[in-house]
Image: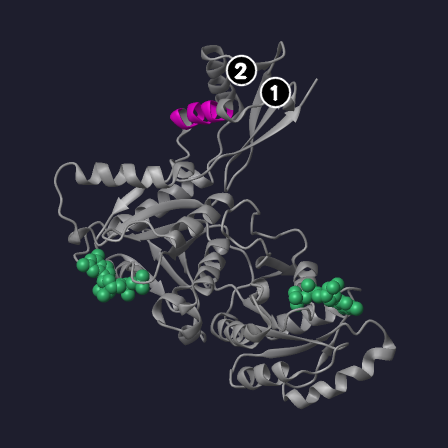
Amino acid sequence: MNDNRPVVAVVGRPNVGKSTIFNKFAGKRISIVEDTPGVTRDRIFAEVEWLNKYFTLIDTGGIEPESEDIILSQMRNQAMLAMDMAHVILFVVDGKAGMTAADKEISQLLRKTKKPVILVVNKIDNQNQYDNIYDFYELGLGTPFAISGANSMGLGDLLDEIVENFPEGLDTEYDEDVIRVAITGKPNAGKSSILNNILGEDRVIVSPIAGTTRDAIDTYLEKNDKKFLLIDTAGLRRKSKIYETVEKYSVIRAMSAVDRADVVLIVIDALEGVTEQDTKVAGIAHDEGKACVFIINKWDLIEKDNKTMGNYTKEIKEKFPFMMYAPILFVSAKTNQRINKILEMVEYVASEHSKRVSTSALNDVIGEAVMLNQPPSDKGKRLKIYYGSQTDIKPPKITLFINDKDLTHFSYQRYIENKIRENFGFEGTSIKFEYREKN
Ligand code: GDP
Ligand code: GDP
């Protein structure tokens, strides 16, 4: 078994057409949800499928530079992020504007990597402009690939080229049996220590991925016949990359991991408490409908009495009111306290995340809830719920067939959600609701 998804990063100056290309490749499968406060609305990650091969695409340019003079330093950061995380790098330049000093500088950096770099000359909209590509040979990155992102010209050939450059040993298929886990949290929260303790646990079998071990981004392991993929563990092992001192870039890295995960572990330093970065990442994990677990680490450093855990739990629930469903584990990577509960919890919330309940059982619960507490009415018209059905998993989605969408109300939805949770659990995952009118 071999499961390590190829990662492709797009690098280039602002306005060369990175987002245009990204959006063409990504189609509809774009993952950053728009309502997360404090997070850039740019589309940064997407899962792309080409001829039955899956890969993750990252637009490292998703962050807009605040001023002209920092464009170059941002591009260096982009290039470093790409060289570190990606298996294949697309370096996009503007065939209309021609070569710039920044292009030259960045290609010097990119030439140092052993990873395949594809030089893409965008905005070659017709044959007449084809001559514009020759200048770019000077960058020393091989034959330039001419495309027009806007007109979708050359994109198929480019995708072929990308797929051909994937290193051996990567898995481009999707294995539904594998639980994908992201370990997030601010620097020094103890993520690497936890990771190492998990890998060192009894009964955990870690499979090095042939040919890619040194560079492997993800770690595959099995415990009690369950399969797990710990995502972007390379990022946890290799420390203090310059770009990661830029907070936005460490958030990007975390978001990329969250995007690919089924289960997100939010590791919090018990002494320090919840940080802004935790709030951001948890918000994204929630919006994207991932299963989530809070891991309160360094529990050995806390002076405890019989109320400490309860108080801490209350505090977490207050800080994340939208994530009441997420379980909390108190652990210590130093003493190994409860570290062996982590994978058990991951497996449990993953099963809740992908659980299906039958329509009849669901309607018994909804029917009883409606009887106990009538739906809201407005101007003499009352909301009627005819029936409900679970229409999706990961996260579970409940479709309610009703008389009139204008009569729906958030607080009533929450009431129904609570009733569903009382009966079916769905612990660790959000539940999405959808309404359909039916007459
Ligand atoms: P980014 O900043 O690198 O992400 O660039 P964008 O994708 O936002 O594109 C910058 C501008 O270039 C936009 O006005 C696009 O419409 C335009 N553009 C992108 N691709 C092409 C192309 O293939 N040909 C032409 N003529 N314009 C393009
Ligand atoms: P990361 O940056 O989130 O990967 O954090 P590390 O795993 O590198 O841990 C940061 C520091 O916290 C290191 O000095 C660890 O030894 C220490 N540390 C990690 N977990 C614990 C814990 O449970 N208890 C204590 N006392 N220290 C810890």
Q: Is residue 52 visible?
A: no
Judging from the image, what secondary structure is the residue with disc 2 in?
A: loop
Which residue sits at x=64%, y=78%?
Answer: 118
Quick check: 31 left or right of 326?
Answer: right
Instruction: Name which residue type carries label 2.
Output: Pro
x%, y% of residue 436?
65, 26
x%, y% of residue 150?
77, 64
Of callouts 1 and 2, the N-terminal one: 2
Q: Which residues are magenta?
A: 413-422
Relative to 163, residue 180 above or below: above
Relative to 365, residue 285 above or below: below
CA–CA distance in space, label 1 to label 2: 9 Å
Q: Which residue is mark 2?
A: 375
Instruction: Name which residue type carries label 1.
Output: Leu
Observer-nearest of 202 and 233? 233
Query: Within 10 angstroms of label 2, few (less than 14), some, or many (20 or more) residues?
Result: some
Q: Which residue is mark 1?
A: 407
x%, y% of residue 111?
56, 85
